[in-house]
Image: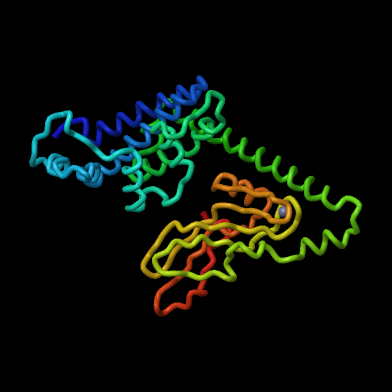
Amino acid sequence: MDDSLSFESFFEGAKKAAHRAMDDHGRSEHDEFALHAGVAVEKLAKAVLVSKNPLYIADIRNADMMLYLGNHLQLPAEKVRTAGAKEAIARLRRIGVLPQQDPQLDLLIEMRNGAAHATPDSTLAKGMISPLARTIETMLGDLGTPLDGFWERWTKAVQDAVNEQEDQVFRDVHLRIAQARHAFEDRFIGLPPEIKEQLLKSPQPRAEEHWIRELQIRDHSVVVLKSASGTCPACGGEGLLAFEPVAFTPGATTFKATGFGCYLCSFEVSGSDELAVLREAHVPDLMNSMTVTHGRTSPPEDLAMGEPQAG
Ligand SMILES: [Zn+2]
């Protein structure tokens, strides 16, 4: 079999692409950054798949590839095809190495495939350093390789860049809290204070939204949960947490909080980075996850709430 499909080759290729991505990032070349970052993730994903079984990188539309990877068939170089970036990531999600949901990683791969373009001053591409660093770290964890075994002289710069981005998210969330608060206060200028108090006590959300008190769990279908939880840092009303399913077993589905929103003042955050800021700075008891058990013996309303702040 071809050496280019070995673990070492994928690992070294991932390293080289990741180092290039950091170089591009420093020069503010965001299109190039997205491309190299995507290649780095793709190659490391394939290294992880190969480390488990060389067949796991086979392009499944091509049975010859499977036989070739199993060392029972010779193929000319131009016929050798492996799974694409998206598929490699999907396989790692399937076997629990990568989280089920990571919209930022999906976006990074779309940018790498040219399906989504980064503009020269794109804060989008700039912000991609966090999913790059996080995904690489998760995969290195699976391989048992320390961070500096991959990032080498870039190790500190990557950590600094992630911290800088977290600071940016922090500032951004706080600006939005102030904006939502001012807009909310402005609505009550000249009105008796009871009106505001009444509104803050009124139940959320709007009638057309599904939320957990009226939730139906159906077998074999994905349910997105919404639950009243936590005081809105902008207006003081009760905010809503949105959850998405992240893990399934035959008897239970685990949901992870992915966003927080308030219908009264329209303040909202989405994604794990922004939720982390909200939790640390304002709403420490914000629920992180919940597990819904289902099956013939458990009533559908049997909910086990995850520990606040866990994970
Ligand atoms: Zn609010």
Q: Residue at x 83, y 59 (%)?
A: 196
Residue sitting farthest toward the front: 208
99 horizontally vs 63: left or right: right
Residue 131 position in % (x across, y down): 47, 39
Q: Residue at x 35, y 44 (%)?
A: 89
Residue 155 position in % (x across, y down): 45, 30
Residue sitting farthest toward the bottom: 297
| In the rendered image, the vertical position of residue 170 relative to residue 151, given as above or below | below
The picture quadrant where one finds residue 44 is top left
Q: Residue at x 39, y 70 (%)?
A: 251
| In the rendered image, the vertical position of residue 5 relative to residue 291, given as above or below | above
Residue 217 position in % (x across, y down): 48, 69
143 horizontally vs 225: left or right: left
| In the rendered image, the vertical position of residue 183 relative to residue 300, given as above or below | above
Residue sitting farthest toward the top: 27
289 horizontally vs 173: left or right: left
| In the rendered image, the vertical position of residue 87 relative to residue 194, given as above or below | above
The picture quadrant where one finds residue 257 is bottom right
Q: Quadrant of the N terminus?
A: top left
